[in-house]
Image (cartoon, rainbow, N blue to C red):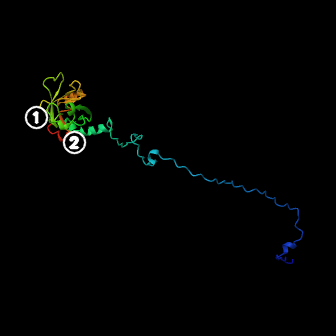
Amino acid sequence: VSPVETQQDQPGDAASLPDALTDDVPLPTRRPQFDAPQQPKVVQQQSKPVQQPKPARETVQQAQPTKPARQGRPADGGNVLAYAKPDTPSGGLGKAFRNLFNSPGSSSGASNGVAVYDISAGTVYMPDGSRLEAHSGIGPMADQPRYANQKNRGPTPPNTYNLSLRESRFHGVEALRLTPVDGRNKYNRDGLLAHTYLLRGRYAQSSGCVAFKDYARFLAAFKKGKIKRLVVVPRLNGSATRVAADNARGA
């Protein structure tokens, strides 16, 4: 037996294989192709800023600058410094000055009950600032200071007089005595009084006394302690208040 010759595969022999291989061999079944699972599309939405919770109003509220409150209108819920207006005294500017002169500690005549009689003007200036009509002297000598030395005819002699109620009525009138503060009767004229108009036919005249048109007001002021002294001057030069103040000592 001849030895079996072993054939060695040479390259390219597979292509030259005889058709011994039959086509009846079924081909392997084709595997179905499965679509790869689609990845879910992720839609990226623009994220909105997350709002932080508002903290408590009491702790976060910024302090607002406080506007100054108008005068006289307090702001709600706060203390307001208000500056009060100075009170306006009733009666106008004139009374304001009178109140000043009447203030405690004032050295003016108004605070010490001193009135001033201006012979030439026929006017008595009262401590409260009011004026009363008054006259003295008779005939052509009335209201003429140069005749003050004429007894029973000339006007009241210029001087400073303390006032006191006459012991008895004078012609039915509660007259006030005029007593010189220095105790001296100028021009030797004494018995001088303050009273209402008494001379018939000559109402704005007197024999030397101070005759008031509205004597009731002057007498009432005396009884209330508002008048204690009367300063008689020929004519008023300057302020009646100053004249009264200069003659108020001891009133």
Label 1: how many residues lie within 10 Å, few (<14), some (14-19) or many (20+)? few
Q: Position of residue 23 (x, y in %)?
A: 88, 63
Say which of 149 and 104 sits in front.
149
Q: Secondary structure at mark 2?
A: helix
Q: Position of residue 111 (x, y in %)?
A: 21, 37
- Farthest right residue in view: 19
Label 2: how many residues lie within 10 Å, few (<14), some (14-19) or many (20+)? some
Which disc number belongs to residue 242?
Answer: 2
Check disc 1 and give the amino acid type: Asn
Which disc number belongs to residue 172?
Answer: none
Q: Position of residue 149 (x, y in %)?
A: 14, 36
* Labels 2 and 1: the sequence-earlier one: 1
Q: How many marks?
A: 2
Quadrant assignment for the C terminus: top left
Q: Secondary structure at mark 1?
A: helix
Check disc 2 and give the amino acid type: Arg
Q: Is residue 244 above or below residue 216?
A: below
Which disc number belongs to residue 188?
Answer: 1
Q: Is residue 234 above or below residue 194?
A: below
